[in-house]
Image (spheres, grey):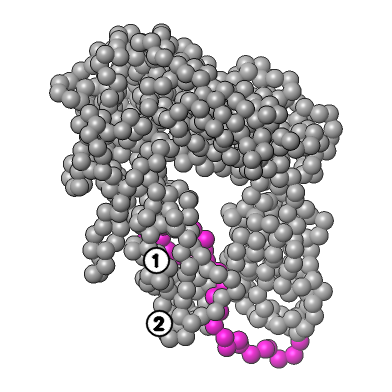
Amino acid sequence: MPVRPSAALFSCVGAALLGGLALHGCSSSSSSSPSGAVRIEGPAVAGLLCDYTDSFARDVPVTVRGQAGGKTQIDGRIVLPNVTGNSVLVVGDSRTTPTLLVPFTGDSAGSFLERPVHLPSLESGIAANVAATIATVTTISGDALPGVSLSFAAGTQVSNTNNVEVRVVGVSPSRLPVPVKANVQGTGEPRAAYLVEPHQVSFTPAATLRIPMLEPASAGPFDAYRVDTTTGTWTRFQDNVAPVGTGSILSFELSVNEGTLYAVVPRNTQTGVTLSGRIVAGGTPVEGYRASCWNRVSDPTGPDGTFQIQGVPDSYGVFLVRAYPAKPGSEFQPELVLSTSTSTALGDIAVAARPPDRIKPTVRSTSPAAGSTNVSRSTQVTVRFSEAIDSQQLNAFKLVGPKGEVAGAYSFDNPFTVRLRPQQRLDPSSDYQIVVERSVQDEAGNLLDDATINFRFTTQGGTPDPDPTDTLAFGLSPLSGARGDTIQIPGRNYTGGTTVTFGGKPGIVRNETSALIEVDVPGTTPAGDATVSLSAGATSVGSLQPLVLDLRATVATIYSGASNETPLVALIRAQPPAQVVIDGQNMGGTSVTIDGVGIAAIDSTVQVGGEAVATGRTISLPIPAPATLVSGPVVVRGSNGRPSKTYRFIQVKE
C-alpha cells in the first residue's frame, strides 16, 4: 500500500508566524485548525526555502509583491495567506540574505511552489562599500568568487544611500530560482549565474560584470539574460556576447545597470533525456512527492510512487535529483532528499514521508514539582517539555515571587529542558510561580499547549539552608559551535583550575567563576559531535546530562595546488591542478560535496603544538577531471552529517 496520511490532515496548508501571529492559509471553511492557532481564510502560496546545504532556512523575509508578507517558519516553510492572481514572490531582504524572485500563479485553493527555493549566502560572494557617487575607477573582486569582478567608472551614480555594500554572489545552475530554459533562444543551459546585490540597486552609467566563460567556445553564440525585477522572469538583454581575453581563461563582460540575477546562456541546441524513478518510504511507494533535476520538475507521484522528469539536460555528466513533498506541511512534514546518478534510471529514492507534525508541545514536568512545599531557597528551576523546542527560545519561562520576576541565568540542559539559575536565594516561606511562555513552540512551529502553564511551589522557612558543597555542570550555551567559538558552561562550586576537554582535546579556559566557565573550542577538534567533559583540579565534575557539542566545519577558501598562495581562478576540466585544497577550520574527517556530488578528499594538516591538526581537505583530481564535477557550492559536513556554516563557490570550465 502506498504511504499517504489521512484526508483529515490535508485541510490546511500550514501555519506561518507573521509578526508573532500564527496565520493559516486553508482551502476549507472551518475556523479552527489542528494546532489551535488563529487562522486566516483565503487562498495561500506555500513552499520550501533551503540554503545551499539543502538545510531548511528559517526566519527569512518573504513577500508576495503588493500582497502578503512574513517570514519562513522553523522548518523552512513559506506560507502566505490571501494571495490571488499572478504575482512574484520576493525571498530575502538584501541585508541579512540575498534577494531572489519567484513568479507564480495563485490558485483559489492554495498554490504550492513546484520546487524548493535555494537561497545562497551573502558570505559566499564578493563585496565592497561604494559611495553614492564613485570618485575613481572601482573594481570589486576577491577569492570567494574567483574570476568574477564588478567594475565602476569614475562618476558612476549608485541609487542607494551612501556607502551601500554592493555584492556579487554565485548561483548554482541546479539552484536557479526560476528556470532559464523557458525564455531563452534555443535550449542552452547556463553553467552558472551571478546575483548582483542589493536588489534593484541601479548604476548610471552601467557597471561591467566580468565572469568566466565556463562553456566550450563551440557552444556559442552566447546571449546574456537577467531576471526582470518586476516580473521575476528571465529576459534577454545582450545578443551575441563575445568572449574576451586570451589563453585558457576567457571571460564575458556584461553591462549591468541594476541589482538582479544574471547569466550567459549558449544558444546551441542541447539534448534532453527523461529520468525515471520511484519514491519509497521503508520500501513502500509514496504518493504525493515530486522530484526535480536541473530545474525540471516531475508531476506529483501517484499510488505507485513512480515519477518521470522530462527534458533534463545531459551535458553536466551527472543528474542531481531532489525529492520533496508536493504539499509540504499539508500532506507531509517538510523534507528534502538529494540523490545523484549518472544513469537516467534512478531506481528508488528513500524518503521519510512523515505526516505533518500538528502536535502541540506540552510541559512534561517541572522542578520543583507543582505543589511542592519546603523547597530549598537555593533551588534552581527546570521545565521539561514533551518534545524538543525551538533552540532560540531560551527564556521559555519565568519565575515570579512576592517581589516580582526573579532574575537569573537561563541555559539548556538538552533540547527538551530549560534551566533557570536565580541570581539570589529565594525568600523564605514564600509562594513562587513558574509561568511558561505561551510563545514556546516546537521545531515544527507548533505553539505550546497552554492548558497548564502555571506551577506553584513554596520555599522553606527558618534559617537559610547551607550552600551546596557538590560541584555540578548544568549544560552548554550554545549547544553547537566551531573552532574558536566561546562556550559557556554554567554550574556551581567551580573551584578554579578547571580543565575542559572537547572529545578529549583541551580547550582554553578564558574565564571561570564559581558559577560559570567560559572556554574556547580547540582548533584541534574535528567537525562532528564532541563530548565535553570537565574537571575541577583532579576531580571529575558530574553533570545532569551528557554534554555533547555539535562542532561545525568552516570553509575559509579554496586554493589550487597545495599552496594557498595561488588562488583558483577557474578549474579547467582538461587541465585541472593536481590538487585542490579546501582551507578552513576544524575540518578533519569531513565529507566534501561539490554541488551535491561527493568528492574523495583527505585531510591536509599542519603541526600545532606538536600535533598534526586537520585545517583543510585536499582533493586530488585526474586529468581530465571527472565530468561529474560541476560548478557550484563546495560544502563540507562533519562526521555527524551536519553541514558547515559556510561554503565557497567553485567554477568548472569546460
State if disc 2 and disc 1 touch (CB < 8 Å).
Answer: no
**Residue 465's spot in the image, x, y percent?**
67, 89
> Which corner quadrant of the image does residue 108 belong to?
top right
Which residue position holds label 1? 520
Say if 601 sits above or below 237 in the image: below
Q: Give the amino acid type for the residue marked by disc 1 in the picture.
A: Asp
**Residue 109's spot in the image, x, y percent?**
74, 23
Which residue position holds label 2? 497
Label 1, residues with CA under 10 Å away: few <14, some 14-19, many ≥20: many
Mark yes or no: residue 102 visible.
Answer: no
Q: Which residues are magenta?
A: 461-488
Decide which of 302, 549 is in the foreground and name it.
302
Query: How far apart are the two marked residues, 1 and 2, measured between alpha carbons?
Result: 15 Å
Decide which of 43, 335 is in the foreground and name it.
335
- Chain-order first, disc 1 or disc 2: 2
**Residue 303's spot in the image, x, y percent?**
71, 29
Q: State the predominant SS element of the stretch in magenta.
A: loop
**Residue 577's spot in the image, x, y percent?**
20, 38
